[in-house]
Amino acid sequence: MEIEHGVTVKILFFAKSKELAGTREARITIPEKITYQQLLNIIAKNYNLETIKDHILLAKNEEVCSDNRELVIREFDNIAVIPPLSGG
C-alpha cells in the first residue's frame, strides 16, 4: 500500500497482542483516512497478530473504534490493540 498523506501513530499493545508482537509499543505510518478493517489488517500483518486478528478491538485515543467506518487519523494519535480478554 502506497501511503499518500501519511501520518505517524503510536501503536500500543496489551496482553496477548503485546506477547505476540514482542513489544509494548511501536510507531507506524498510515494514511490519514483508512477503514477500520484496513488498519486492523496492517497491524495484524506487521506485528504477528494474525492468529487473534478476528478478536482484536482497536481504540483511537482511548475510544473504541467502530469496525464499519472510515477513520480519520491525525499525526501522533495513539492506537490501542485490545486483544480478547480471558479470566476466570
Image: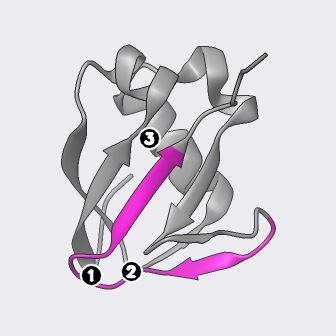
Q: Are marks 1 and 2 in contact (CB under 8 Å)?
A: yes
First in sequence: mark 1 vs mark 3: 1
| Distance (Cα) linking label 3 and label 2 | 15 Å
What segment carries the magenta color? 68-81
- Which of the two discs, 1 and 2, labels the residue nearer the N terminus? 1
Q: Which tag, 3 or 2, sits closer to the chain's start?
A: 2
Check disc 3 and report its element: helix, strand or loop.
Answer: helix
**Residue beneath disc 1:** 5
Q: Amino acid at mark 3?
A: Ile
Q: Residue 57: image x %, image y %?
A: 65, 48
Q: Which residue is mark 3?
A: 43
**Image spot of residue 79 (x, y percent):** 41, 61
Residue 78 belongs to magenta span: yes
Residue at horizontal 42%, vertical 19%?
A: 48
Q: CA distance from mark 1 to mark 2?
A: 6 Å
**Label disc, if present, on residue 32 of the rendered structure:** 2
Dot 1: few (<14), some (14–19), or many (≥20) neighbours within 10 Å?
few
